[in-house]
Amino acid sequence: MAEKLHLMVVGAHCGDGEIQAGAIAYKYAKAGHKVTFLHLTAGEKGNPPHISVEDYRKQKIEEAERAAAVLGGKSITLDYNDAELKEDDETVTTVAKLFRQLKPNVVITHWENSMHPDHARCPKIVQAAWLKAALPGFEIDGLPPHSLTRMFHSENWEDMEGYEPDIFVDVSEEFNTYLEALSQYWFIMNSSDFRYYDYYKALGTMRGCLTRTNYAQTLKFPIGANKRKGATIPGFDL
């Protein structure tokens, strides 16, 4: 590998990025690339009856750190409130500052059509932060400008309206580790509202069937982007 690149997975809540693109992230981490999971909120308001919202926030941050470690990456959780995420200048500037500090090359985030308002706002925040981080006219704590190379959307059961995959990444060798990472989250293993673990195991199987591999995860180009369909991230080939 000629150059070590930085893949960042940005989710609205702890757990979103991992379930959507955790196996892809691990594939690139194994190849020597840097991987960061950025969570805009902890997703703390889905707390079970036996634990307070604040205690569940702490628990989810700890779960995110364990999951990221399994997948060969690092976890960062911002201090915004679950179900109250705003697409405002303060939030955009916070993410833009992280882009300048951490210098990701490729970002994977939610698809823009979602039943969850936080999910729908997340890719808009990412796109606005990309622009703000890249333009030298924006002064952010004296940090030099930095532009992403590409942004992609990933697959989440709450974000499926209009989601048609462009890229199928073979994650057959990474899938068991991906499932181990998912198991770090209480809600994935114990939710009474949705069978997260079963769904994402089945989704990986189904996407693998379509691409003639055991397991696969998918990505989608942003609307209007210059598409190049394939089995790897363009500009981020293994």
Image (cartoon, helix red, strand yellow):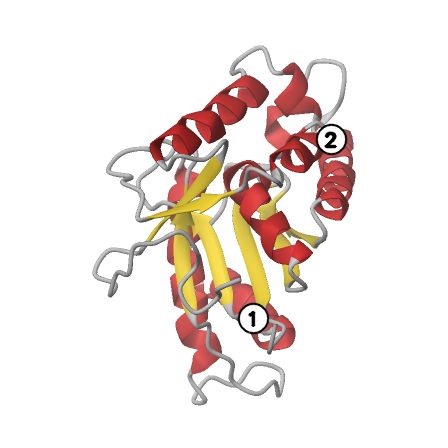
Residue tagged by mark 2?
184
Residue tagged by mark 1?
99
Disc 2 crowd rating (10 Å Cα; few below 14, some 14-19, many 20+) is many
Quadrant occupied by the N terminus: bottom right
Residue drawn at x 55%, y 22% as measured from the top left: 196
Q: Position of residue 226 (x, y in %)?
A: 24, 65
What amino acid is at disc 1? Phe
- Of 204 and 61, the residue lying toward us: 204
Using residue 55 as the reference point, say whether residue 23 is left or right of it: left
Q: Position of residue 95 (x, y in %)?
A: 54, 64
Q: Position of residue 183 (x, y in %)?
A: 70, 27
Disc 1 crowd rating (10 Å Cα; few below 14, some 14-19, many 20+) is many
Residue drawn at x 70%, y 29% as measured from the top left: 185
What amino acid is at disc 2? Gln
Quadrant in the rendering for residue 30: bottom right
Q: Secondary structure at mark 2?
A: loop
Residue 136 against residue 204 in the figure, above or below: below
Q: Is residue 91 visible?
A: yes
Residue drawn at x 73%, y 31% as measured from the top left: 184
Q: Secondary structure at mark 1?
A: helix
Q: Position of residue 29 (x, y in %)?
A: 66, 56
| Mark pair 1, 2: CA separation | 27 Å
